[in-house]
Amino acid sequence: MPKIFKSLKMEFELRDARLPEFKWHTTPRLARTVNSKFLQFDVRSLDPGKFSFPFHFHHASEELFMVISGEATLRTPEGFEKVEKGDIVFF
């Protein structure tokens, strides 16, 4: 049975960080609500001028994000790139 998440109706919690620039709003782990075995996911919202996480990479995992609204700046090994509503980024 499909589970539909309405992004405009989601409730977000503030995720605090030691550095104020790295604060974001997030949903509880949505994957648990559908009993996902292999996929972990959440929805995050960033305030203007904030960062979701310091620059990093993973050796043994993959990440995917989609910009639902607004725009952001993505830092890659090649430099910075704007991403906007509708863009999907795979790492």
Image: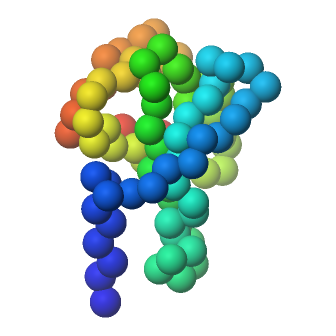
* Quadrant of the image occupied by residue 57: top right
Q: Is 91 situated above or below 77?
A: below
How far from the left and from the top, in percent, is residue 20? 68, 20
Q: Looking at the image, which is closer to me, 62 or 50?
A: 50
Rendered residue at 45%/10% (across/down) = 79
Farthest residue to the left: give it.
Answer: 86
Which residue occupies the foreground of this view, 76 or 34?
Answer: 34
Which quadrant of the rendered structure holds the N terminus? bottom left
| Residue 79 vs residue 74, the one in the foreground | 74
Compared with 56, 73 (above or below) is above
Q: Residue furthest right?
A: 18
- Residue 69 is situated, as x and y percent measured from the top left of the image, at 26, 36
Left or right: 89, with 51 as reference point: left
Q: Is residue 80 above or below residue 70?
A: above
Residue drawn at 57 percent across, 63 percent down:
29
Residue beneath the point at 63% across and 25% down: 22
Q: Position of residue 12 (x, y in %)?
A: 49, 50
The image position of residue 46, as x and y in percent, is 46, 31
